[in-house]
Amino acid sequence: MNRFRSILIFPGSIILVFCFCYAAIFAQQPKSVNDKGYKKGILQKIASLIERKYVMAEKAGMYATEFKKKVKAGAYASITHAREFADKVTADLQAITHDKHVSLRMIEASDIGEKAVGALHHPVRLHRLRLKENTGIHKLEWINGHIGYLDLRRFWAIEVARDMIKAAMKFMENADAIIIDVRENGGGSGTHLSSFFLPYPTQLTGWYYRVQNYMEEFWTTDEMEGKPLTDVPLFLLIGKNTFSAAEIFAYDLQARKRAILIGEPTKGGAHSIDLFKIDDRFEINISTSRAINPVTGTNWEGTGVIPDIPGAPEKALATAIELAEKAAKEFSKSKDAKLKLAVDEMQVQLALAEKLFKENDTTAAKTALNSLFQTGARAGLINEFFINVLAYNYYSDKPEPILYAILEKSTELFPNSAKAHETLADAYYNYGKKELAVPYYEKAFELDPGNSNVRKRLKELKDRK
């Protein structure tokens, strides 16, 4: 048996290892379930895979035996259509195992119409699905001026989801409370979203693999750039369609007491699957590993994740908004108090810098100014816009040295910003310090060669020499 493995996302799965399992007995078989011999071979293969691969080794044999009894009793004898056959087998396997991840599926082309039996089939199909789903991000909203809301319909692997997830988190980074809606999230791949809400490093739910007898650990990552959201009040909406990876997300946050879960119990799928190719027409999802949470020592298989606050689906969002409003007010008070302390400290440092510049004690003045920027950075205030607005207060007919010092600080903090260098150069130029302006114009042009205004200004200054 040849075997090719690669990490893929698949609807309703958590982390999917796609396994091409070729069996010579199917190479020349007809592709119709009307053929009794063909059908018998498929059913035998399914029973064998369940017995050898299903994650619960102590139950796998029993499940395979129950399935064989159904086959022997003629449960599939009268079925002549491939899709009906796949649906019936799936329903029976799920009834036997009580595992919603197990399913027999037809191999079909995506809407592009690629060759369904070719190696490109799954990559193309998943690519099309991701585009249609907007990488899982169904809706982003800013509610009542301070609550972030994300409706996430699937978890996609970090390789393709990173930029979209970072953008969504950036959208919500200044929220006083956040609501994430996974009521219609059927699963997917990865635990990267937890890294925004839990400290690094925090151990998350891991996977025990039966065949390898191996426990794989998962932890939050420090690779997700952006403002930490570890203290923002967080609410999750869950429901009967929340499944697989979405359940991991909810379960991890609930176990760490990081979020309040609102809604209905989830679907109850705490297994991860391998996809085994049976022949050119059918493939089967079989659970080959199970989730184990490091806090609870167990998982949610069969029971689902239980909400902290039960509620009907039509009322869940309203309940979450009501609770988020209350939490946001308290969070905002604390946040604003910290900001006020930082601003008070910055005002003292700025007053000292102004005084020292007037006394021509430039070194001490710049030290005070550095302290101001450090305090502001810790408070999340410092960016190019903030610095430019601060500098604006010192433009006059005869500017004070602090103006140049502030703009110089901008070029230090944002060395790759053409605008920062151009702004300082303009200040020197406009106040007659044209020789000092040249190196900053040159740097601005190096960073932004398409800036025609800087190019003209440089030509003018060089022509004067």
Image (cartoon, rainbow, N blue to C red):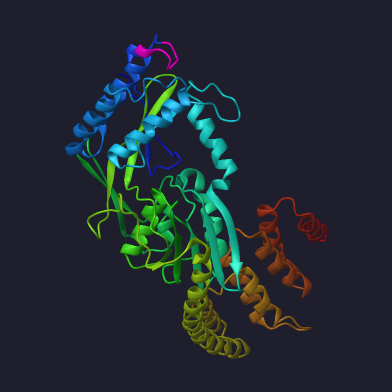
The part of the chain drawn in magenta is: 30-37
**Residue at the spot 51% in from the left edge and 75% down from the top edge:** 322
Which image quadrant for residue 354?
Answer: bottom right
Q: Nearer the viewer, residue 6 or 381?
A: 6
**Residue at the spot 43% in from the left edge and 31% down from the top edge:** 87
Which image quadrant for residue 424?
Answer: bottom right
Quarter of the figure that contains the N terminus? top left
Q: Is residue 217 visible?
A: no
Q: Main secondary structure of the magenta part?
A: loop
> Residue 369, image x and y in percent?
55, 80
Whether residue 12 sits left or right of residue 149 in the image: it is: left
Whether residue 221 sits left or right of residue 391 in the image: it is: left
Whether residue 117 sits left or right of residue 440 in the image: it is: left
Please say whether residue 340 is one of the residues in the magenta stretch. no
Q: Is 49 situated above or below 398? A: above
Which image quadrant for residue 252?
Answer: bottom left
Q: Nearer the viewer, residue 317 or 122?
A: 317
Q: Is 389 situated above or below 252? A: below
Quarter of the figure that contains the C terminus? bottom right
Q: Is 459 situated above or below 107? A: below
Please say whether residue 36 is one of the residues in the magenta stretch. yes
> Residue 346, image x and y in percent?
54, 84
Q: Nearer the viewer, residue 434 or 452?
A: 452
| Residue sticking out furthest to the left | 58
